[in-house]
Amino acid sequence: MTPPGPPRGDASSSGADRRRPARAVTAADLPANATRPDPARADAPTAGPARRCPRPTKEQLAAAADKLLPDLLAPGLDVLFVGINPGLWSAATGWHFARPGNRFWPALHRGGFTPRLLHPSEQDELPALGLGITNMVARASARADELSAEELVTGAELLTGKVRRYRPRWVAVVGVTAYRIGFARPRAGFGPQPDRLGPARLWVLPNPSGLNAHFTAESLGAAFGELRAAAGAAR
């Protein structure tokens, strides 16, 4: 049977040695009139770095294709979130789920994982909260549907190795289609999974991309909250 195609949606990091790691964009890299994120947006942080972080230019986004984004890992995390692959914004800035309109960070806060809404540039605060981020596929692309099924299968194998090494309690794959393809579970749904990944329990969350119209900000937050409750109860 022909395997299902790769997932659609916004792309959200190991790979070939020829690829260059992403370098974070700084204000010195950008023109003085570069557009800043709008603090009035519903998904923008209320204070701090959100108002100071410049947007990457079109040239920087184009150059970010196929770059790698470092994992955010530590031993013994409570939850390791697994994106599909880095988007161009993430590869250009060095921040996971960085594209404006991606709802990962608001959902993380709504779900009770963070005490306040974090900006992607504050991602280094997550390990202290028992949280980490990696990706099924390392290379950055404009959209997740640019990935092949083979890349997702290989990514699942690499993820298993990371989990065995770092031993998080829960692994949450952010995107059901990527999970179905990568782990050969075509009927998998959202929520807890019957399988384990090494020592970790498995959970599947909706893709927080703004292109995923099946979930609102509220329903995404509720889905993340279910994982938060389960992870806390299983301590």
Image: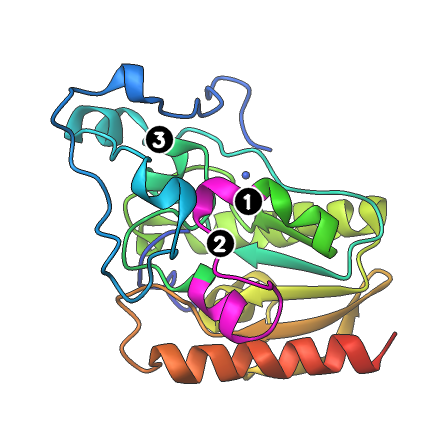
**Residue 101 position in % (x across, y down):** 28, 59
Asked which secondary structure carries label 3, the reply is helix
> In the rendered image, which quarter is residue 78 located in?
bottom right
| Label of residue 123 in the image | 1
Dot 1 lies on which element?
A: helix
Q: Which quarter of the figure has residue 9?
A: bottom left
Where residue 43 appears, as percent x and y from the top left, is 33, 63
Instruction: Give the Cα separation between the discs numbered 1 and 2.
Output: 7 Å
Q: Quadrant of residue 131?
A: bottom right
Are there few (<14), some (14-19), or many (20+) residues within 10 Å of tag 2?
A: many
Residue on which the image places disc 2? 118
Please report contact status of discs 1 and 2: CB closer than 8 Å, yes or no: yes
Seen at 39% across and 55% down, the residue is: 45
Q: CA distance from mark 3 to mark 1?
A: 15 Å
Q: Quadrant of the C terminus?
A: bottom right
Callout 3–callout 1 Cβ contact below 8 Å:
no
Q: Which mark is residue 154?
A: none
Of residues 134 and 2, which is closer to you in this image?
Answer: 134
For disc 3, the marked residue is 92
Q: Would residue 113 appear left or right of 219 to someone viewing this image?
A: right
- Earlier in the chain: of badge 3 and badge 2, it is 3
Return the residue nearer the eye: 70 or 156: 70
Span colored in magenta? 106-123
Taking the magenta stretch, the answer to whether it contains residue 116 is yes
Mark 3 residue type: Ala
Camera-nearest label, 3 or 1: 1
Residue drawn at 55 percent across, 51 percent down: 136
Do we see residue 235 in this rendering?
yes
> 198 left or right of 17?
right
Coloring scheme of the render? rainbow
Q: Is residue 168 above or below residue 154?
A: below
Which comes sooner in the sequence, label 3 or label 1?
3
